[in-house]
Amino acid sequence: MQERFLQVYTAALADVLDDRGLREQTLPPSIRPLVPGTRLAGPAYTVEGEPSVHDDWDAAIRKTLAMLGDVPSGHVAVYQCHQGTAAHFGELSATSLAARNVAGCVIDGGCRDTRFIVDEGFPVFAGHLTPEDSTWRWQVTATQVPIVIGRVRIAPGDWVVGDDDGVVVVPRAVAEDVLAEAEAKVGTENAIRDAVRAGVAPLDAYEQFGTF
């Protein structure tokens, strides 16, 4: 399924979800890929954290490192940080996840060491960039629990798909059906594209194909 999700674009998935009445499945547009052209797909490994003003750097970093070590291969780490100033993800985090074939990271929070992460080739979507470390200011509070980012509820195992347009979350219970419908939609849109390039009027194309 991962390879198939990587072959469809998020707009097709969003349209299929809309048609099914699932209209709150797209993450906030502030969450962007570090590099244009980045794609990711995988089941969600959810992470929740909270602001924490403390003097125990060691205890806080241990919680983060334990969490990083638990993310399974092929999954996407998805962070709800509840803190909008620091960097919650950096180069060594990316390197450790990449080494275990984790599919990527989506952060409703911050990222730093971006040049090193880009060189590593690890897919990251983040809400902001900053050099400020989070360890003095933030801590992990839970993993593999339902989280909410923007208007989207994300449960462990839901499929997370990202491309240049943003990030879409496909509930696990309907993932196979949504994927099949999106694949069919991509095929139809390819036919529409050929038709309008050949001079077919937009309304005529809509009436012929039933979508646009």
Image (spheres, rainbow, N blue to C red):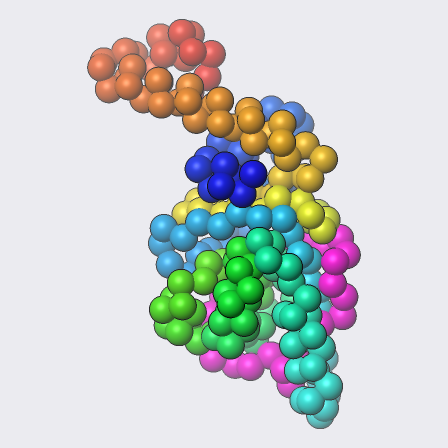
Residue occupying image coordinates x 69% and y 74%: 66
Give, as a single range, the part of the protein colored magenta.
126-149
Q: Is residue 123 magenta?
A: no
> Where is residue 163 drawn, in percent x and y?
44, 47
Please tell me how many numbered marks the rendered image carries: 0
Left or right side of 75 for 66: right
Q: 142 or 126: which is nearer to us? A: 142
- Which residue is more in the foreground, 210 or 191? 191
Nearer to me, 88 or 175: 175
Q: Is residue 160 above or below residue 21?
A: below
Is 5 rendered above or below residue 15? below
Q: Residue 132 lies in magenta, yes or no?
A: yes
How far across and down, in percent of the image, does residue 147 sit? 72, 55
Residue at 32% from the left image edge and 22% from the top image edge: 193
Quadrant position of the N terminus in the picture = top right
- Residue 10 on image: x %, y %: 49, 39
**Could you tell me residue 156's position as x and y percent?**
72, 51
Q: Is residue 126 visible?
A: no
Q: Compared with residue 164, is residue 170 higher up or lower down, i.e. above or below?
A: above
Looking at this rendering, what residue extends furthest in the left direction?
198
Left or right of residue 84: residue 4:
left
Rendered image quadrant of residue 49: bottom right
Quarter placement of the C terminus:
top left
Determine the residue located farthest toward the bottom in the rendered image.
Answer: 55
